[in-house]
Image: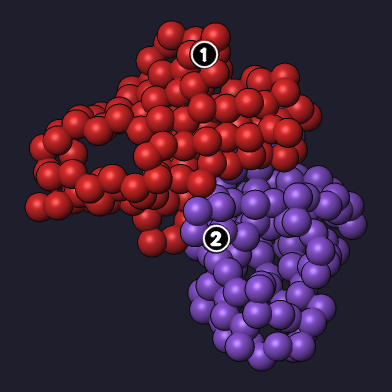
Chain colours: A red, B purple
Amino acid sequence: EDKVVQSPLSLVVHEGDTVTLNCSYEVTNFRSLLWYKQEKKAPTFLFMLTSSGIEKKSGRLSSILDKKELFSILNITATQTGDSAVYLCAVPNTGGFKTIFGAGTRLFVKA
Amino acid sequence: DVKVTQSSRYLVKRTGEKVFLECVQDMDHENMFWYRQDPGLGLRLIYFSYDVKMKEKGDIPEGYSVSREKKERFSLILESASTNQTSMYLCASTLRGGHMNEQFFGPGTRLTVL
């Protein structure tokens, strides 16, 4: 059965800390992995990763994929209170219509 | 910008009531999805639709039905609401299928069934 597992489930850090969120997957015919940020309401798209070892970067956020070990990490450097959110990892399955989501990592950044 | 809207942000219904959740997207996307989100379980797919009048069961379709009469609108129906359907419901759309399209989400409807 296809699955996506995120860790940790929750995390509390101080402003300025660097955090690493983990996502491991077992999905048949893997093609891509996506990261979303969910604050109070709708998840918003962060990154799409398709190739191993190529870092995607957006400001203080970066992500990388390891297709051999079947995982991805999302790094946030110099965290701010506005980074407090649930971060979701998602992998479309064969055919691409069904997307398997992890349970999410709830990050809380203290001022 | 893609916009996905949902008819209600918060909804409180009684057990046995019929409940309609509406979702509208304004970017001519082919595919629309309904998820429910529960703590510790992530997003679970209820139903999706890849074209008008077409629908496919997701992972947890029991107790739900859907309707897609127009391309921009995808409705989720709880025929007889039960307390275990208390949850956050999220609608999403993508331009087309395949692995290279991120999903655009609506703001969610938090449904409480008493």
Q: Residue at x 45, y 23 (%)?
A: A72
Please rate how many residues cluster around mark 2, counting C-alpha atoms within 10 Å: few if below 14, some from 14 to 19, many from 20: some
Tell me: A101 left or right of B46.
left
Q: Residue at x 79, y 59 (%)?
A: B61
Horizontal and vertical percent for residue B32? 71, 51
Residue A69 has which mark? 1
Please name the residue that numbered disc 2 is placed on: B38
Tell me: A101 left or right of A105.
right
In the rendered image, the vertical position of residue B96 relative to residue B53, given as above or below? above
Horizontal and vertical percent for residue B100? 63, 27
Closer-to-camera residue (B99/A93): A93
In the rendered image, the vertical position of residue A11 relative to residue B4, given as above or below? above
Residue B89 image-quadrant placement = bottom right
Give the residue furthest to the right.
B53
What chain letter is assigned to the residue under label 2?
A: B
In the rendered image, the vertical position of residue A2 relative to residue A15, given as above or below? above
Horizontal and vertical percent for residue A99? 66, 39
Q: Residue at x 37, y 55 (%)?
A: A39
SS class of the residue under badge 1?
Answer: loop
Are discs 2 and 1 both within one chain? no
The answer to whether residue A75 of the structure is visible from this angle is yes
**Quarter occupied by the C terminus of chain B:** bottom right
The answer to whether residue A44 of the structure is visible from this angle is no
Amino acid type, callout 2: Asp
